[in-house]
Image (cartoon, rainbow, N blue to C red):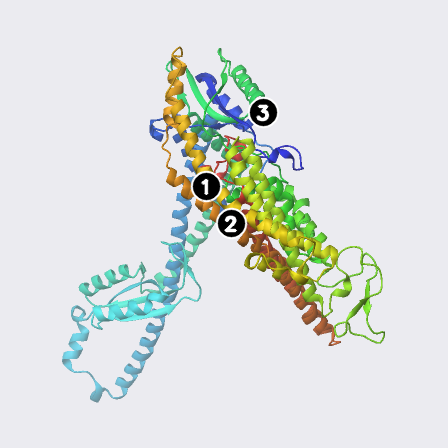
Amino acid sequence: MVGGGCCPSMELFRSEPMQLVQLIIPIESAHMTISYLGDLGLIQFKDLNAEKSPFQRTYATQIKRCGEMARKLRFFREQMMKAGVSPSTSPARQVDIDLDDSELKLGEFEAELIEINANSEKLQRTYNELLEYKLVLQKAGEFFYTAQSSATAQQREIDAHQFDEGSIDSPLLLEQEMSADPSKQVKLGFISGLIPREKSMAFERIIFRATRGNVFLKQAAVEYSVTDPVSGEKIEKNVFVVFYSGERVKTKILKICEAFGANRYPFTDDLRKQAQIITEVSEKIAEMKTTIDVGLLHRDNLLKTIGYQFEQWDFLVRKEKSIYHTLNMLSIDVTKKCLVAEGWSPVFAIKQIQDALHRASSESNSQVGAIFQVLHTKESPPTYFRTNKFTSAFQTIVDAYGVAKYQEANPGLFTIITFPFLFAVMFGDWGHGISLFLASLFFIFREKKFSGQKLGDMTEMIFGGRYCIMLMAMFSIYTGLIYNEFFSVPFELFGKSAYACRDTLCRDATTVGLIKVGPTYPFGLDPKWHGSRSELPFLNSLKMKMSILIGVTQMNLGIVLSYFNAKFFGNGLNIWFQFIPQMIFLNSLFGYLSVLIIMKWCTGSQVDLYHIMIYMFLSPTDDLGENQLFVGQKNVQLTLLLLALVAVPWMLLPKPFLLKKQHQERHQGQSYMMLHRTDDSLEVEAHHDSHGHEEFEFSEVFVHQLIHTIEFVLGSVSNTASYLRLWALSLAHSELSSVFYEKVLLLAWGFNNIIILIIGIMVFIFATVGVLLVMETLSAFLHALRLHWVEFMNKFYEGDGYQFQPFAFALLSEEDD
């Protein structure tokens, strides 16, 4: 849900107070009441007819009617997409269209469109058949014309030859008689048509085998793809003519043609008739083309008429369908004159809901107004946080892990700052930060345009988190200034460097040491550190210790939030036997390490912190020697080690036994009840029977507490080590940026060739954008996500609630159909 304002507030710390409300609505005003509540979007209705199937509910007919209208609209959408017609988007949705009139219009438009499509399909099929017929006439006509010309020429040669040598080569008497008798001559039939080119070889082979070679097959390839009349797809085809003798052979050939999907067309061997038929077919093709074009124009005009009101109809149908779905969740009063609704709503929405009920009753001319009352229940309400376009992305990050339990402390408020900051620690470069900031500003300035469009999955995710990306970029600029890196190049932004070469003749600071000659660099890392031989050891030490300090601070924040949760829900056991021992254990070890890091920085001592922490466990009574930072350090370490050892059984043992004692006392107290209560006593007893007398398994509780204790003890070590990813990714980002700058850009610059320089700049830009601004951004984002989900939120966040999903027309989508 989107609330007012644009800045985060403490409203995000606790979810909105919710209440279970009951509405008693007269039937004559039920539709309008639900419509107004859908516009308001502040009630999550409960299904009071869960035992009934969808067909047994009161408004099943109306839902079926809306479903049929939705089917027609989907049909119209498909037809518009095929025709390239887009629905006109009106600035304001006119939801006052009458449903009955819309249903009538949709039915008329559907019938007309189906008729147009059917006629167009028939005409198109006929048109494609005529085109194929014309091809057969042309190609097969060439076969007969060529054969007839060849036969005529051959006959002339034979006649001339017989005239010269008639006595020797003249045919025998029997042959002359047979050739003179027409009844004894062999008559050949032929079948012509088109076949797909990919099937032509198999077609020829099958015909040859089926007829044992007693046919003559002639094929000619069509130069262009032909639209098949049956499938409507463009296919490469061959024109064929099969000559045969006998009816049995003809039957076999026809069956083979049918099996191979060959389209057969009639043909005559008379050349005059062929020319006449080709002329007639060409005239029909021209007429058919004109008729098809007129039909398509009429179809496009009809689709444009539909598209003009399509969005309004679509929203109306989805709205009406959702209203009737909601009405089916309501139960009918025994008088069958009222509908009873129950649902969750925020406490602040009481006045708005009552106004909507009053307005619906007055506009529907109902004699009786709707009744609004609050119900008391032990059921856990849904969780609802009022967010806006700025805070919604951070709340989504938290909800992806789990929805907060009702009134549980919400880490989303702290995530607004901690998430971009942890990202920036790993992505510290103010040049890359500026690039990311400009990309986020592009989406922010064009949010009105993008919010009304359908974006791709990746683009939509980036657009939804545009303000989160903006904060990530701003924090990256800040940490980049601290690291003093601009695409890995240092700058003296805040003053002169405090260091210079040891020798006045030195030119390369990487081969000789540096000495301090001026005041400390005022902000961030001194630029002289970059490129020196001490850069990597110095930055490793700095970023590793900084990661530990950040991690211990955030884990302490998580434990403190568990205290606020326990205090809010009145759970004293969690305060005394979870919050306190956890704070003692974590800070006795890693809190102490953080103090040592700060003291070492402040004093400039050379003590080995690894040695101190290792021998704090292995040899706690030995003298520290040169690794002593302050007086009494040995006694402090013994005390902290003892407190950490005591904290473990403190977390493990008392809580299960105290829970068992509380359960026994509660069970014993419920055995007695005051006699003067009648109805209320029965209700209390029923309530306690269902909730209070749940079985208490001490073994399960103890095992659960054991697992929780082991998880925290081991997790304190692993989680602290996990924060070292801040150091590792920051170092990797810096080194990658340095490699691209030195090995690509500077190397190309050194060739003194403009072509190589341009190529080097292009490679540098693509490498920076592809690797550092895309892959490294995604990597740092995922690692920051893991640090929040695992290392921070597991200290206090249960996340076993369920989200408030109100009935709201603003949340309707096309998938609701």
Question: Secondary structure under badge 3?
Answer: helix
Spot the residue most to the left.
Answer: 174
Residue 198, image quadrant? bottom left
Residue 348: which disc?
Answer: 3
Q: Specify whether 509 is left or right of 275.
A: right
Amino acid under disc 2:
Val
Which is nearer the eye, 377 or 341? 377
How far apart, in angstroms, are the residues tagged by discs 2 and 3?
A: 43 Å
Q: Residue at x 61, y 43 (%)?
A: 557
Question: If you read the primary sequence from the N terminus, does the residue marked by circle 2 or circle 3 appear first?
Answer: 3
Identify residue for label 2.
Answer: 713
Measuring from the top left, give residue 411's x and y in whole percent. 58, 41
Is residue 351 left or right of 224 when viewed as pictured? right
Residue 47 in the image: x percent, y percent?
Answer: 41, 28
Q: Amino acid at mark 1?
A: Leu
* Residue 65 can be seen in this image: no
Foreground tag (2 vs 3): 2
Q: How many marks?
A: 3
Instruction: Work out which quarter of the rendered image holds the C terminus and state it.
Output: top left
Q: Quadrant of residue 510?
A: bottom right
Which residue was labeled with disc 1? 653
- The residue nearer to you, when weighing 127 against 677, is 677
* Label 1 element class: loop
Question: At 39% across and 26% down in the image, what residue appears?
Answer: 667
Q: Is residue 736 visible?
A: yes
In the picture shown, does residue 114 fall above or below 770?
A: above
Q: Nearer the viewer, residue 790 or 484?
A: 790
At numbered mark 2, what does the secondary structure look like: helix, strand or loop? helix
